[in-house]
Amino acid sequence: MAIGYFLLVGDKTTCGGQIITGDHTMTFDGRATAREGDKVTCGKHSGTYMIVGGISDMFDMGQRLAGTLDSVSTCPCKARFINSIMDCYEKESQPVNQAVAPANMAAQNLSSPAGKTAGVQSGPTPVPKAPPPIPVFTKSCLRGKGCTDAGTEAEPADNFGRMAIYQVPSSPVPVTPQKPEPPPQGKQHPPEPDKPQDKKLPWYKRWFSRGKDKAEAAATAVAATARSAVAEGEELVMRYIGGGATSAGRWLAAPNPVTVGLMGLFYSPELNQGEEDYLNQYQLRQIAEQFGKAPTRVRFRWIRDEKSGRMTIQGYHVSLESGLDKVPVHMMKLNRTTGNYEFWEPGEHRPTILWTPNEQEFKVPAHTGNEEQPFIPSQITVLPIPDKVGSDIESLPMPEEKDFRDYILVFPADSGMKPIYVMFNTPRNQPGTVTGQGQKVEGNWLSRAGQDMGAPIPSQIADKLRGRTFNNFDDFRKAFWKEVGNDPELAKDLSDVNKKRIKELGYAPFAIPIEQVGGKKKFDIHHVKPIKDGGAVYDLDNLRVVTPKKHIELHSN
């Protein structure tokens, strides 16, 4: 029996590196647990690497826990890890006749007569069993059974599951269901029978339908309002606007500082089909109860379509190596006062979205014309992460974790509903007017981007941008860097390549290599008060320019 030890963030490698990422929802003495796939540095080579190998029967959110007997670094040194805690696990030793490598066994047999009677039997070399795939929420149907790798080519989102898209009106619509006339005194209405088709159809066909009649009905149906148990005010009815699939029941959004605006709802048809490739409902519920994250092989976000100028959906293949393959998992909780199921985003004081199984008919709220109409393509495409298909694809910037606002939602076991994936629009994609004064800067301004909270916005740039309105934060970012490029004093310390990038194209300049991390190489703009906490998107005094290394550090604290 061999004894191994669990590994944590901060544990050293035998070459002088250390583990730098882990699961902060599972800790030992306040330190995050390391798992297969987490990031590690090397003491002799620059860059970041990964932990490969993990404890075969111990998992955290679908990833094997890292241990001293089972894990190594992918750095050129192939370093092993030095544990800092004495929490251990046991591992069965290999049988005596398999403990020595085949080549050594042959040498022993030739050099020692004892070897002929040592009990080593000739025969084919045992083939090690391939480790099971990392179970995921969903994967492409192009990946066969036993493979949960991310895709590398563009493919339709329908390969992963079905999607429904909803929009929230710009203002509350005070709609209430039509109440039936009361029966004569002393009499009661007979109970309404269940719809025959509801009992015959499986849950996913009641939740999602591709039928034309169902889609048209959903487009003209409206949700009930939820009151009492949530904060004051009317909820906002979500209107189905497309996506090829529709949801049963009714979706609502509660007004909050980070308004939903647009929601994409995604269902994986392969979920709970008994394959080890997929996380089952029980596993997802466990993750949700721990406020953890689950691996997936596709994520979606709302972006601004460059051609039409309207919001649209973009999907991305997300591999373990990308660092973007984990999605927060939360519970949809039943509000017994209203009968609605509610999801509260972290830090919010009222539900973000609500779902009710109410099947009554409601009056349709008129489209006011004030809401921006998104562009919903007939086929939503899932693309590889840009850095995987080209050295520097700027027309499709590499997404970062902060660009996503998505969740896997798990319903209570007695609800009969299965887990779903939802993604919301973010304030980064909303128009806004620039405010703030910036700060006076001197010398090499960007040299401060890797220190403290980063480099402030120069006051002379603030004077150029203040009062201007942008459709989204990406447009603001380009305008910001172009203004920096047009300022001789600020641009004088940049290389010729960086000067061209910012002045002509509005692309962020490259940081020095020591401040780069993996595929993240360019300076970024950081919100001091996070947007999700109500931080102003376009307030220059809430912005700092940071290096990739500093940005990761700020978001990990």
Image (cartoon, rainbow, N blue to C red):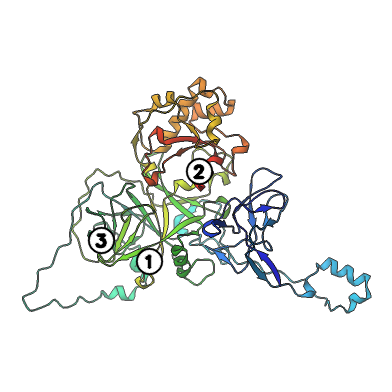
Name the amino acid, label 1: Phe
Can residue 456 be seen here? The reply is: yes
User: What residue sits right under mark 2 in the picture?
Assistant: 554
Marks 3 and 1, Cα distance to the nearest angstrom? 19 Å
Q: Is residue 134 above or below residue 542?
A: below
User: What residue sits right under mark 3 in the picture?
Assistant: 229
Query: In the visual, does 231 lie left or right of 70?
Result: left
Label 3 or label 1, whichever lies nearer to me, is 3
Query: In the visual, does 285 lie left or right of 29?
Result: left
Asked if marks 1 and 2 touch (Cβ < 8 Å), the reply is no
**Image location (x, y in percent) of residue 279:** 50, 66
Q: Is residue 405 above or below residue 432?
A: below
Report the quarter where the N terminus lies: bottom right
**Image location (x, y in percent) of residue 57:** 60, 69
Name the amino acid, label 3: Ala
- Name the outermost residue toward the left: 185
Label 1 or label 2, whichever lies nearer to me, is 2
**Image location (x, y in percent) of residue 418:** 40, 67
Marks 1 and 2, Cα distance to the nearest angstrom? 33 Å
Mark 1 or 2, nearer chain start: 1
Which one is nearer the viewer's eye here, 343 or 273? 343
User: What residue sits right under mark 1 in the picture?
Assistant: 411
